[in-house]
């Protein structure tokens, strides 16, 4: 008996592999952008953002940008993951159960990771809460969401400064864990105002992503490019003028010396969520994770530009989008990859620190660690997609719970329908995008 496969069989197998790597109807540009955000996040987790003199390293280029991109993409996924429900009945209440289940699952996973992680500030709890809040905006049109997002970016940092100054609230940088439930008021302050990526400001990214998902991205690439470039130039340009021309820089030097604040870190490597309240001039900076209007505007701009580039590349590649699979495969399962990265980092970091000569003269130990994380997650994501399913284990598990607990309403019959068939539509887009912890790009 011959064991040779026929050319037709080989072709069919090849087509099946390509379909799994680049499924029709999916916005692969968004998956590629998620992949970029994941790996940029890993850069900021593994490489030093500043040198011994306190000056920024090359890795600081990613500081503040990967996390913003993640948040904008999370807003996109919130809309895409509820589109079938909203289109079936037009009622927000039909989308509420799926969003709350997804938000609750993200919070649960975040509390678990926060309880075991010693290296990162896991902020999945923040994302879960923001999903639940953003649900209230699901019925708004793209233009309304875009306007609200921009206004939110401008006003929320001012409101945060006023509240923190009025009540003397100091930053409390700690990852959310099960232990924080013992002090709910402190936990609330940390989530909304004083912790890593405070919800008050970061919700603006989610709203912007929702606006992006409400439009036909492929038909509005130039508009998104113009919006992204405009936001970036406004954020960086006005901040530069205020700091270098209007006297903000010299004022901040005096304030930093008086209160012992690291001005270089605030300007170039990160404020971990909020600025000091010692001067209103702090709101003029655009440093990573500073949560100022100019930080939010400029990083929102880079997020839109990244989405445009990735989606344009996917359009240009057409049927050859499988070449993007090293990005799109991990990007299609961000919650699983991020969670695994948090755990793997707890394993690789002690190993790296115990072997300071690892990599020899060719590579630094940090380069070896980063390469290991990248290779592990590209390979595991590709194997999972080819051998098991389109969604990662955590994404698939959450989707199964949602399908079981809250089937999609059938607009034709007024009854509910399972989400496993064609009627599920965009529900297949994973809505469990994750945030990232401390030192996210």
Image (spheres, rainbow, N blue to C red):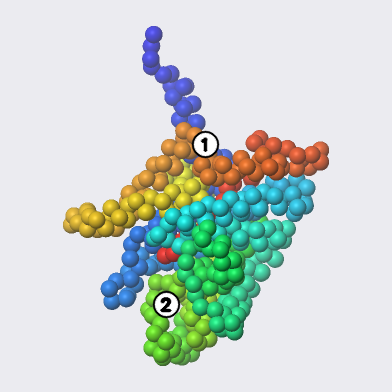
Q: Residues within 10 Å of mark 1 (few under 14, many from 20)?
A: few
Q: Is residue 164 above or below residue 129?
A: below
Q: Residues within 10 Å of mark 2 (few under 14, many from 20)?
A: some
- Give the distance between the C-alpha atoms of the residues marked 1 and 2, in whole angstroms: 43 Å
- Image location (x, y in percent) of residue 115: 47, 56
Disc 1 designates what residue?
389
Q: Is residue 138 above or below residue 402?
A: below
Q: Residue at x 68, y 42 (%)?
A: 405
Return the residue nearer the eye: 341 or 156: 341
Return the residue nearer the eye: 334 or 87: 334
Name the image quarter holding the C terminus: bottom left
Q: Residue at x 64, y 50 (%)?
A: 101
- Image location (x, y in percent) of residue 337: 46, 49
Residue 267: mark = 2
- Image location (x, y in percent) of residue 428: 61, 43
Which secondary structure lies at badge 1? loop
Q: Residue furthest top?
A: 1
Which secondary structure lies at badge 2? helix
Residue 228 appears in view: no
Q: Is residue 377 above or below residue 287?
A: above
Q: Residue at x 40, y 45 (%)?
A: 378
């Amino acid at each position: 008996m011959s064991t040779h496969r026929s050319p037709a069989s080989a072709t069919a197998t090849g087509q099946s592999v390509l379909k799994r790597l680049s499924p029709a109807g999916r916005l692969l540009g968004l998956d590629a952008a998620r992949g970029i955000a994941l790996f940029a996040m890993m850069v900021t987790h593994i490489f030093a953002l500043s040198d011994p003199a306190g000056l920024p390293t090359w890795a600081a280029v990613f500081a503040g940008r990967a996390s913003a991109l993640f948040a904008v993409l999370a807003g996109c996924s919130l809309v895409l993951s509820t589109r079938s429900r909203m289109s079936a009945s037009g009622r927000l209440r039909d989308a509420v159960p799926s969003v709350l289940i997804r938000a609750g699952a993200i919070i649960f996973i975040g509390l678990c990771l926060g309880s075991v992680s010693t290296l990162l500030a896991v902020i999945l709890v923040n994302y879960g809460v923001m999903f639940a809040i953003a649900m209230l905006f699901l019925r708004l049109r793209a233009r309304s969401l875009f306007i609200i997002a921009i206004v939110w970016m401008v006003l929320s940092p001012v409101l945060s400064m006023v509240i923190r100054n009025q009540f003397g609230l100091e930053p409390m940088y700690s990852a959310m864990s099960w232990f924080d439930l013992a002090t709910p008021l402190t936990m609330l302050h940390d989530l909304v105002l004083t912790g890593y990526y405070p919800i008050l400001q970061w919700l603006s990214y989610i709203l912007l992503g929702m606006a992006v998902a409400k439009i036909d991205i492929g038909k509005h690439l130039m508009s998104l490019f113009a919006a992204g470039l405009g936001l970036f130039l406004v954020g960086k340009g006005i901040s530069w003028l205020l700091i270098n021309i209007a006297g903000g820089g010299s004022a901040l030097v005096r304030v930093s010396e008086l209160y012992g604040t690291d001005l270089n870190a605030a300007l170039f490597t990160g404020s971990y969520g909020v600025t000091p309240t010692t001067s209103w001039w702090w709101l003029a900076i655009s440093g990573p994770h500073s949560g100022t209007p100019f930080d939010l505007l400029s990083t929102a701009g880079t997020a839109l530009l990244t989405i445009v580039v990735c989606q344009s590349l996917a359009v240009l590649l057409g049927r050859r989008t499988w070449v993007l699979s090293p990005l799109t495969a991990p990007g299609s399962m961000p919650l699983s990859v991020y969670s695994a990265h948090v755990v793997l980092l707890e394993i690789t970091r002690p190993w790296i620190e115990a072997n300071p000569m690892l990599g020899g003269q060719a590579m630094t130990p940090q380069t070896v660690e980063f390469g290991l994380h990248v290779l592990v997650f590209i390979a595991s994501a590709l194997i999972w997609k080819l051998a098991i399913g389109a969604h990662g284990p955590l994404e698939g598990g959450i989707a199964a719970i949602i399908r079981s607990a809250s089937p999609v309403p059938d607009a034709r019959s007024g009854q509910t329908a399972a989400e496993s068939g064609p009627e599920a539509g965009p529900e297949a887009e994973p809505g469990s995008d994750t945030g990232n912890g401390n030192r996210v790009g």
